[in-house]
Amino acid sequence: MQEVHGPTDQQRTLVLGRTGSGKSVFAIALLSTRNFDEMPWVIIDYKGEDLIGEIRKHCKSKIKTISVTDNPPTRPGLYWMKPVPKVDDDAMEVWLMKVWKKGRTGLFIDEGFALPQKDAFDIILTQGRSLHIPVICLYQRPAWMSRFAVAQADFFAVFDQNDERDLKTTKAFVKSAKMKDKEGKIVEVTVYSELPKYHCLWYDVGRGYSSVLFPAPDPKQILSTFKRRLRVASPANKARALI
């Protein structure tokens, strides 16, 4: 077994899979480990993901809401925006170009296809590594991804897909993995393989190998991680502080 590596604070991760496959929980768990204590990370929440909503609800004072008309944040921390697809495309394009010029800003994007189909995100993907612009980007439909997204990704997390075009697209750039089956035999796992629920194929582009990852932590554990890292006081601790 080869050692499984995760992304550094400069690298790009694409998380692929159909609705309900577990990709959002996995991606948010990955976000919970990022360096938002050292630089700003912006959640671009096109979909209005439920778990992100729960995290914002419990960490509201620690996650600042911004809009596409604001300048990119400069202070470390977590930030949240909810652009409207198509309607906010021009403003979002301008905002992304500001991120590129500024650098040192992490981007969590759910869903990648909702981004403006223009130049700014491709520029960030091709030049952003040296500018310290790490990216976690989710896609339901890999067949619709930008070629720059594929070419510039450092890691792919591939969850269950049910469209033949998406499977063919993913198979073209994600290598197979080896794992033991229930009988202890070593078997090959590809994007076409039927993995256990919420498992994914994790492809490390730089090292050129894939692994099968177990499901991400339970959403309650993920929320707990955010609360701990954002230093959100529990009700009991708040009460003690008033005594």
Image (cartoon, rainbow, N blue to C red):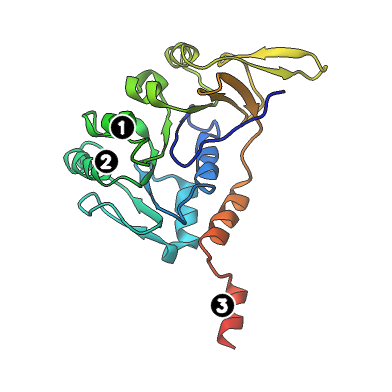
Q: Is residue 103 visible?
A: yes
Q: Which residue type carries mark 3?
A: Lys
**Disc 3: which residue:** 238
Q: Which residue type carries mark 1?
A: Gln
Of callouts 1 and 3, the N-terminal one: 1
> Which residue is at a point 75% across and 14% down the rendered structure image?
186
The quadrant the N terminus occupies is top right
Q: Nearer the viewer, residue 21 or 145?
A: 145
Disc 3 from disc 2: Cα separation: 40 Å
- Label annotation for residue 193: none
> Which residue is at a point 53% across and 66% down the rendered structure image?
232
Of callouts 3 and 2, the N-terminal one: 2
**Disc 2: which residue:** 100
Q: Which residue type carries mark 2?
A: Trp
| Residue 13 image position (x, y, % from top left) | 46, 32
Classify mark 1: residues with Cα within 10 Å, few (<14), some (14-19) or many (20+): some
